[in-house]
Image (cartoon, rainbow, N blue to C red):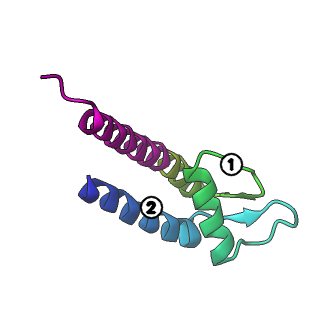
Amino acid sequence: MRTILGFMLGLFVVLSIAMYYYGGAVETVNRTPASLGQTWYLCAITALTIGYGDVVPTTAFGRIDAVLLGLIGLLFIGLITAAAVRGVQEAAHGAAPHNQ
């Protein structure tokens, strides 16, 4: 599980860097190129599937990158949720009284 989550986090970082250099991220208020911080924000908001729309990609690569970031976010959240549910189930199973 750690390996999968680590791989997905690494892929998020790579896609975020690619978004900064090739995604054409811009602020929608004044249509200026997004800073590195704004691009990381765009990638995080996209991966969390929130998508405020205040920073957007403008190239075809950036749009594909955003879709991939959204998919990674869904998978990441799903895996963390599954691990938490399993942990609760195992804790409940371990705390159940033993019938003898």
**Residue for point 54% across, 52% down:** 47
Q: Where is residue 25 shown, x and y percent of the image? A: 67, 64
Q: Where is residue 57 shown, x and y percent of the image? A: 65, 58
Q: Is residue 77 magenta?
A: yes
Q: Quick check: 96 left or right of 22? A: left
Q: Quadrant of the C terminus?
A: top left
Q: Quick check: 54 left or right of 82? A: right
Q: Is residue 20 above or below residue 11?
A: below
Q: Amino acid at mark 2?
A: Phe
**Residue for point 60% across, 45% down:** 49
Q: Earlier in the sequence, mark 1 or mark 2?
A: 2
Q: Is residue 58 magenta?
A: no
Q: Which residues are magenta?
A: 71-100
Q: Residues within 10 Å of mark 1 (few under 14, many from 20)?
A: some
Distance from Cα at disc 1 to Cα at disc 2? 16 Å
Q: Which residue is mark 1?
A: 51
Give the structural element (helix, strand or loop) at label 1: loop
Q: Which residue is mark 2?
A: 12
Q: Where is residue 19 shown, x and y percent of the image? A: 55, 65
Q: Amino acid at mark 1?
A: Gly
